[in-house]
Each structure stands twice: as C-alpha cells, then as structure tokens.
C-alpha cells in the first residue's frame, strides 16, 4: 500500500512538472510583450518609452535567456514562490490563495449538486414501470451535456434574477449569490454522470444476482438502491476525477457570467494580460487538484467493490 | 441653475491664454461606442440630496487604482474621484481653470510653470496640500517610470520643482513643454499625500494611498468591487465643478461585471444604478423607460487608419486617398453604431478644443476613389480586386477594438476594388504584432483633450506615425505648438488637418464616445473635460 502510494506520488510529481514546463514555454512563445502590457501600453497606443520598458523587463528578469528564466521559475515553483504578478506586483501565489476559497466553495457545492442530481436522475430513468416515462427521463441527460455552461447561466440569470428578481445576478455576498452559479456549473457534469450511471444501471439490472434479489421478493426500489446502484456506481465513480477537472474549467465561464471572484476569473484576467507568474501558479494548482483527485478515486475503489485490489496485485494476475 | 451639472460659462480670463497649450494623455481602452454629442439631459431635477450609495458597474479590475499609475478606462473612473489636481478642464469650453492652484504663470517658451496654491486644502489624512508636497508628487511620478507611463510622458524633460514658499512652486523643463498645463488637470498628475510616496507601487495599486479628491478608497476587493466613500470636510472643488463643499454621495460602489449582457440586465433590474459600458445594441432599452443615456465623444484623435508610408502599398498617395473616399462614414454610424454617435468630421473628434470640421473632405465619393485608382494604374482583376504590376491591392489591419465598424469598412472598400483583410486579436497579441512593424495601416484612437495631440502623432519631428519624410504639413504642426493665440493656433490646426486628409496621411473613420446609462434615481453623474466620469456632483433620490 505504502509503495503504491509512493509510486503514484512520484507519477503525480512528474505530471506537475510537465504541466509547469509546457505552460511556461507556451506562454513564452505567445506573441506578446508582458512588459509592454504591464506598462499599460495595450489600450490606446500610448507609446511607452523603450528605456522604461527595458527597466521593467530587467525588474521582472525578462531580459535573461529563456532557459535561465525557466530554471529560476521552476526553482521558485518548487518552493511555492511564483514571483510577483506583472500586473499588480503582489505575489502570484497569494493572489491564487485569495481566489481559491470562493472557487472551492462554488465547485464543492456544484459537485454535490451534480452527484445528487445525476444519481437521482439516473435512478429515476430506470425506475418507472411506464416505458414512455423512462424514455422521456433518459432523454434529459444528453440535453444537459449538450448545453454550453454559458447559455445555461445566461438563461437562468434572465429568468430568475432579471425578471423574477428572486436571486442576485452578481457578486459573492451570501448564499443567495451562490445558488445560480452552482446550479449552472452543476448541470453539465450532473448530466454526464446521469448518462453513465443510468446506462450502467440498466446493465446491472440484467445480472443474475438482481434476478436472485427479485426472486427473494425485493421491490423495484429496493433492488435499485440496495443492490444494483452500488455495483453500477463504479464507472460513474471513475468519471469523478475527470468531472472535478471539468468543474475547474467550468468555473472560468461561470464566474465570468455571474461576476464572481475566484480562480476562473483570475485565470481569464491573467491569460489576457499574459501575467506569466499568476498563470503558472494556477496551472500548477490545477494539475495538483487533478493528481490528488485521481489518486483519491483510485484509493477508494476497494471500498466500493472488494473485488478490486491494488495495482501491484493486478500486475501479478496478468503475469 | 439648480442642477449639479458642471458650469459651462466662460471662465475668468486668467487661464484663457494658456488653456490651449495642453495635452491630455490617458490611455483609454474598451469604453463606450461611437461619438455623439448631447451632453445635456442628465435627468437632473430638483435640489441635490446628500447621502446614499451609487452602484456603478465596470467591466474589468485592472489590478490597480493608483491615479498616478492607471491607464485603463475602468480604473480611471475609480481613480479620478480620489484625487484633486492643480487645474481642471471645463468640459464645455476645454478651458483650463483653477482647482488646487488659484493662478499660474507660464514662461514665454513654455518651459517653466509657476503655480500659486490655494490656502486651506488638505489631503484626506489632514496633511496640508503645500508646495513641498506637490514637488514630492512630481518627483515620485518620474521615479515610478514605466509603471506611471502616462504621468511620466507628461513630465518628459522634467528638470525639477522649486519651492519658493508653502503656496508657490515652479516646475522647470529642459525644453518647451506646452502640453504640461493641461496635463496638470489630469488624474495622472493628481496629488497624493507625501506619505504615499514612500509606499511601494504595489501598495499604491492596492488602494493604500491617501488622495486629495472628494472621495477616498474605502475598500478594494479584487475582481469584485471597489468602494469609495466621501471625504469629510472636502472644500476645494474646481471652478469647473457645479457646487462646492463635500460630495453628495456617501459612497460609490464600483462593481466589476465582465459580461456585457449581465451589465445590461443588472441595470434594467435595478441591481446596479449606472454604468458606462452598455453595448450599442442594448442602449435603446435605456433611452427612457425609467433610465437615461448621456453620451460624449472622447476628445482627441478619432478612430482612423494610419498609413505607414514606408511600406510600398501605403506609400502610394492614390491608394490612401481612394481608401478615404471609399469609406461611407455615415453608413457606419447608421448601421453598427447608435443614433447618438458621430462619424469622424475631422482628424480630431469634434469635442476636442479647436477641432476643425472637415466634413467636405470626408464625404463618401466612391466614383472619385475609383477614378484615382484607375489613373494610378490599379486595374480591376478577375476577382474584383485591383492589381498593379502583379501586386494585389490587398492589405491586412491588425487591431483589438470593436470589429463591427471595420467590418463595414471592409465591405465598402470591396466596392472600389480594395481588399482589406481584418485580423482581430487580443490586446496582447496586437501590441506584439505592431511592435514588429510589419503592416501597411495601423488602426486606433487616442483620447487627449488638446489639439497638440495632432502634432504629437503626425509631425515628422515627433512620433511620425506615417513614417514619412518631412513635408509642408510638419511646419504647420510644429508652429501650432508654439502659437499662444487661440485663433492663430486654431487656423494652423485646421490647415494641418486639411493637408493630412488631402494627402491621405490620416484616414478618419468615426469618433469613440463614452455613454453613461443610468436609472432615473441617479442625477448629476457627468463627464469632466476629457470624458472621464465625475461623481463629485452625482446624487441619488432617497430610496
């Protein structure tokens, strides 16, 4: 077990390094000049004195060879010091740390809604005796998957905030402001989850042990929730890692539409202004979230289904 | 008059002779739509009421609200309220009038400025605004360098400030710096308490500075909101202001709302009170119906195509002039802008002091354009695009601004056989591509509140945007900077503008403008001289 975790941790570190390195060089290759942007010459063309720009480049170390910049940035990242933001001068790490709690709250609530809603929809789509109703409910998830977050957000805003005035459209204040963005963010992953889960439920319902359970007199609902769901959940559970990554991406759109503070907004702003230190900090954090989620999901498999064992044993079986 | 809108009448003559030698620099981005007029109807009725909060939406948090460092429109809207300046510019006349300086003298060669400060004015922390503190400010702006890009441009050639007594100071330049007087009216040279000079640029950006204006920074939550509260005891308003004493509003909340449709919806549903960033298509719903619109063309150089005449294509005068004749400016306003917008009527927008109306030269004349191109040997090819010596009359313009007007220009030029390719990119990329210098035409506008911007941009002895050898027009431009008589200066500006358009050095398209959209409960929210927002006279109906 310990060896397994250690090996996975090493793989995780490699993923972090790769994400950092790719992001660094992609940003470096972008056709723009962070110094000119930081000096504010991006708007109306205020010609900034080239000597002043050189000063600024020197201040941020942008005048050094790219590999030196890379080594420096990497060493900084190892110590969790990403350097000052080009735009505000504040440490990039602390900008990210400030934005993180709001995004964690939003994505946490959205994930809960997605899991609960997705599961409920999946169960509902196999439960009814009416074939027509089952089909109607099964048609919902593909719609949810197909709708862009952007559109969902704007439609919800239009109806529930601008017209009905039930919930605020903007800001981070109070739980009311969290409702619409969380629902918006939860719909696509919830629908994806429902799709996978209902398909796997339908498969599981044909298994012999379900037959046995029925024969012993278990009702529809009991068969579903008590027997089939637990086994059917494995493929959906595998998706969770991917969904968490998707939520971070979705936060970019959701936070922008609902004018919420958070990592998503910080990402948009930093990419637009090519604020390299901040973007790198966000990339490393996102990669970390991805690595940790995947690891946690893998570690939890045996709890769901004792037949699944640790990877080394799997290798032994293959041999 | 009982309304708090800025006074428009003529100001005492003390400053009149100098009002003209000025330059307002302020990098503006995003902003409103095209240029219009009608800076009247604010819906301001009745006596101003003190108190209350005004919620105003901005589009982006540009990570800095220090007046001496900001350059983005939204940040300027916040920063402008927190500082007073030595002078102010009357939005109606463009005249420079007293604010913190009661009077001033300028040396004949415009290289030395002496200001006499008013008594009793203080910074928000109670420190007196004296000559020494003004010196500290100017020295600090020069020291900030690149991060104070606007302010340090105003202070190019700054030799130093000499303090004669607590109320008198002299600013010296190494060479004539005619633009400096108007520059003292801008937020970029707005005054901060001496203690602020010791802060790091980052701390100042975060709003930790102490200003001198009618409002002070209460809180600044990144990407979310900036709250300003009124300064108690503020009693040094400028002569361009409509009232004296403290600001009416208790607080102004600047709410960051990045999505255009959400700004419109939030205004319509009363979640915000006003904004200056409503898209042209959404504006009609705020024209009445419990709302009001007020639009002002940004002074300065209108949106235009700037030929880079060192390139083979743009060096052909026939091509340049034909493009200018082939643009139907009115159609752009009628089709993609609002009814309050204006087509360019000259190189400078009509709200710029001393701007000349060149409507006759800018009339739509496709036949004239085709004739010019025919005569110059550009023959229409199979695909409808003209060619000469195997080269197609085709070029690419790179830009980040609103693409709709240029898309229409593209269609219009197609009619006369010119192929204009558009490369619409993010600001960052645009800046980089322009730095490489590989293009025939550039495209942008510049917000400045003094005609000197014409010389600054076009003169072969200044920025020389056309990248061309000196010619007749440069003499006119250079003389205009030295002319102290407004009539003489106006004449030089007009002649120079004519030459620029006639030779196709300037191809104006339309005027950028800023539009305030506000609920009827908001009154007196207005534009200052360079179309920056002014909340000092704003008030709201008690709710």
Image: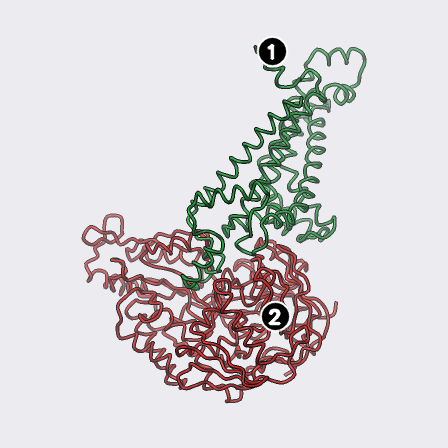
- Determine contact: label 2, label 1, CB under 8 Å: no
On screen, residue A234 versus residue A82, left or right, reads right
Kindly give the residue lying farthest to the right in the view shown: A217
The chain containing the residue under callout 2 comes to B
Q: Nearer the viewer, mark 2 or mark 1?
A: 1
Tag 2, which secondary structure?
helix
Residue depicted at 50% across the width and 84% down the height: B114
Instruction: Classify A201 as above or below B215.
Output: above
What's the colour of chain B in the image? red
Q: Nearer the viewer, residue B189 or B194?
A: B194
Q: Are marks 2 and 1 on the same chain?
A: no
- Residue located beneath label 1 in the image: A317
Which chain comes out green in the rendered image?
A
Label 1: few (<14), some or many (≥20) within 10 Å?
few
Any mark on residue B81, and which? 2
Tell me residue B94's x, y (percent): 49, 79
- Quarter occupied by residue A140: top right
């Amino acid at each position: 077990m310990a060896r397994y975790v250690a090996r996975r941790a090493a793989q995780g570190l490699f993923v972090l390094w790769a994400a950092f390195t790719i992001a660094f060089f992609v940003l470096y290759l972008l056709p723009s000049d962070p110094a000119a942007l930081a000096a504010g010459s991006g708007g109306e063309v205020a010609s900034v004195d080239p000597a002043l720009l050189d000063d600024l480049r020197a201040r941020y170390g942008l005048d050094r060879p790219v590999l030196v910049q890379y080594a420096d940035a990497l060493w900084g990242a190892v110590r969790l010091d990403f350097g000052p933001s080009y735009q505000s001068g504040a440490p990039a790490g602390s900008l990210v740390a400030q934005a993180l709690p709001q995004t964690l709250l939003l994505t946490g609530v959205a994930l809960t809604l997605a899991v609960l809603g997705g599961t409920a929809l999946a169960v509902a789509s196999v439960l009814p005796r009416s074939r027509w109703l089952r089909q109607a409910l099964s048609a919902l998830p593909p719609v949810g998957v197909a709708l862009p977050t952007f559109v969902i957000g704007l439609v919800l805003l239009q109806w529930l905030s601008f017209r009905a005035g039930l919930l605020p459209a903007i800001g981070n204040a109070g739980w009311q402001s969290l409702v619409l963005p969380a629902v918006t963010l939860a719909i696509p992953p919830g629908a994806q989850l429902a799709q996978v889960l209902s398909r796997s439920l339908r498969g599981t319902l044909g298994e012999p042990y379900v037959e046995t359970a029925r024969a012993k007199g278990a009702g529809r609902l009991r068969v579903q929730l008590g027997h089939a769901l637990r086994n059917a959940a494995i493929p959906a559970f595998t998706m969770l890692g991917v969904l968490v990554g998707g939520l971070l991406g979705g936060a970019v759109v959701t936070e922008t539409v609902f004018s919420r503070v958070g990592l998503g907004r910080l990402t948009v702003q930093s990419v637009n202004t090519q604020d390299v230190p901040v973007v790198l900090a966000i990339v490393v954090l996102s990669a970390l979230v991805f690595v940790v989620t995947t690891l946690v999901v893998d570690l939890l498999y045996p709890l769901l289904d004792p037949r699944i064992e640790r990877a080394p044993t799997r290798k032994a079986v293959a041999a | 008059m009982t309304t708090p809108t800025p006074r428009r009448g003529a100001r005492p003559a003390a400053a009149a002779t100098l009002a003209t030698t000025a330059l307002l620099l302020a990098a503006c981005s995003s902003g409103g739509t095209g240029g219009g007029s009608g800076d009247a109807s604010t819906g301001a009725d009745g006596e101003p009421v003190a108190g209350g909060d005004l919620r105003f939406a901005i589009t982006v948090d540009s990570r800095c609200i220090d007046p001496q460092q900001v350059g983005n429109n939204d940040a300027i809207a916040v920063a402008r309220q927190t500082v007073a300046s030595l002078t102010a510019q009357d939005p109606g006349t463009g005249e420079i009038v007293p604010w913190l300086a009661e009077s001033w003298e300028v040396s004949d060669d415009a290289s030395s400025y002496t200001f006499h400060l008013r008594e009793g004015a203080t910074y928000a922390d109670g420190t007196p605004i004296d000559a020494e503190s003004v010196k500290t400010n100017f020295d600090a702006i020069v020291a900030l360098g690149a991060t104070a890009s606007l302010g340090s441009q105003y202070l190019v050639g700054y030799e130093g400030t000499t303090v004669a007594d607590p109320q008198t100071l002299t600013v010296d330049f190494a060479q004539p710096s005619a633009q400096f007087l108007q520059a003292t009216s801008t937020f970029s040279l707005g005054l901060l308490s001496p203690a602020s000079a010791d802060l790091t640029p980052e701390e100042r950006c975060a709003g930790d500075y102490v200003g001198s204006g009618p409002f002070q920074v209460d809180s600044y939550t990144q990407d979310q909101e900036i709250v300003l509260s009124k300064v108690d005891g503020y009693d040094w308003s400028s002569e361009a202001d409509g009232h004296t004493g403290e600001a009416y509003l208790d607080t102004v909340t600047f709410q960051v709302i990045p999505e255009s449709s959400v700004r419109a919806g939030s205004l319509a549903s009363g979640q915000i009170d006003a904004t200056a960033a409503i898209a042209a298509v959404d504006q009609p719903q705020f024209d009445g119906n419990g709302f009001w619109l007020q639009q002002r063309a940004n002074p300065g150089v209108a949106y235009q195509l700037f030929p880079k005449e060192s390139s083979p294509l743009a060096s052909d005068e026939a091509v340049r002039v034909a493009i200018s004749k082939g643009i139907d400016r009115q159609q752009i306003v009628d089709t993609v802008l609002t009814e309050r917008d204006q087509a360019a009527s000259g190189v400078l927008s009509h709200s710029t002091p001393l701007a000349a109306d060149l409507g006759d030269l800018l009339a739509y004349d496709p036949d004239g354009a085709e004739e010019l191109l025919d005569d110059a040997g550009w023959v229409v090819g199979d695909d409808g695009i003209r060619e000469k010596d195997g080269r197609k009359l085709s070029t690419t313009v790179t830009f980040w601004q609103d693409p709709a007007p240029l898309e229409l220009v593209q269609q219009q030029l197609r009619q006369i056989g010119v192929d204009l390719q558009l490369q619409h990119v993010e600001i960052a990329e645009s800046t980089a591509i322009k730095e490489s210098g590989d293009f025939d035409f550039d495209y942008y506008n510049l917000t400045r509140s003094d005609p000197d911007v014409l010389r600054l941009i076009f003169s072969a002895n200044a920025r020389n945007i056309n990248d061309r050898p000196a010619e007749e027009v440069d003499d006119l431009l250079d003389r205009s900077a030295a002319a102290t008589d407004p009539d003489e200066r106006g004449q030089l500006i007009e002649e120079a503008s004519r030459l620029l358009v006639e030779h196709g050095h300037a191809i104006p398209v339309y005027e950028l403008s800023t539009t305030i959209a506000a609920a009827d409960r908001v009154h007196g929210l207005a534009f200052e001289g360079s179309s920056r927002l002014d909340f000092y006279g704003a008030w709201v109906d008690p709710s």
